[in-house]
Amino acid sequence: MLVSLAAVWGGSFFFAEVALTEVPPLTITFYRVVLAVPILASIVHLQGVTLPRSVRVWGAYLIMGALNNAIPFSLIFWGQTRIDSGLASILNGTTAVFAALLAGLLLADEPLSKKKVVGAALGLAGVAYIMGPEALNGLNPGNLAQLAVLGAALSYALAGVWGRRALAGQPPLVNALGMLIGSSLLMAPVVIMVDGLPSPDLSWRVWSALIGVASLSTAFAYVLYFAILGRAGAANLLLVTLLIPPFAIGLGAAFLGERMGPQAWIGFAIIALGISVTDGRLFSRRLARTTIPKP
């Protein structure tokens, strides 16, 4: 299930790359959330779960929809107009590092530990290696695109903290549906003002990509996400961050002719090390295996 989740989330970068040939980034975000709503609503209905009526909860869904959908989707899709999908997925992998760091700073039950600080430092070092020293000489479009994806990762991390604080008592899939409805309401006026009314006159290839990113990478992904969360816990879900880039890079190489240079791969390795340090279990298990038991 974890590999399947990584595949559908990694596929979102591929679907977006295809859709960007005919659709602007903000409109792709709009299609992604709007088309996912009826799919997830059907699943929630089949489970017999009712939607909350509280104004406070729906206000929280609007904020969650902005932080977890509208803002990061738009930033990533805009970033992909200037950088390859594989590189975008690698930079998006810093979400786990940002999430651990922000949770340590903002949540009382997740204190900031040494491993979180070291993991965050390694994650930022990986990003710095990918962007290179030339990023300090000026902000060209490629650098801005990378910063946009990093902004999306930070937004995802803030969404995690907000969700813990404002929506902890609600059913998980209902929270997912609520934030999709919230992000749809937020994106509709923005898209009309910036891009104009979305045109249905798109090629079958682009429509397939839009349906894929909405149904597989959004609605189905949320179902998988919460199923894994219930069975394996949040710590194991962190591993998906390491699995997404290989899928995104593989799809980009197979179908879009993208190629990641050694700088991106080395940067990914450093970011992956940072995630592993933040998680901590890999090194604790290795230490346990190498410790000589007392007689």
Image: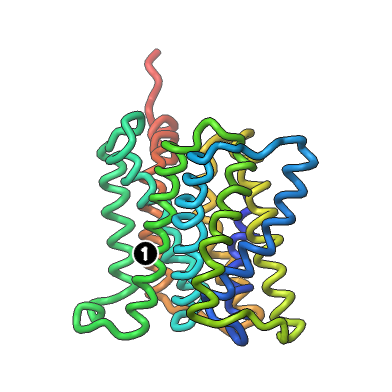
Q: Which residue is mark 1?
A: 151
Q: Quadrant of residue 287?
A: top left
Farthest top residue in view: 295
* Figure coloring: rainbow
**Above or below for 183 versus 43:** below
Residue 235 visible to an observer of this rendering? no
Residue 107 at what x, y percent from top left? 33, 35
Give residue 48's quadrant in the image.
top right
- Residue type at numbered disc 1: Gly
Q: Residue at x 70, y 36 (%)?
A: 50
12 sits to left or right of 203: left
**Looking at the image, which is closer to me, 6 or 168?**
168
Residue 157 in the image: x percent, y percent?
A: 40, 51
* Residue under the point 41% across and 41% down: 279
| Quarter of the image where the C terminus is located | top left
Question: To which quarter of the image does residue 123 belong?
Answer: bottom left
Query: Which residue is found at the position 64% from the left and 61% from the top?
Result: 217
Residue 112 horizontal side relative to residue 54, left or right? left
Q: Residue at x 53, y 75 (%)?
A: 191
Q: Secondary structure at mark 1?
A: helix
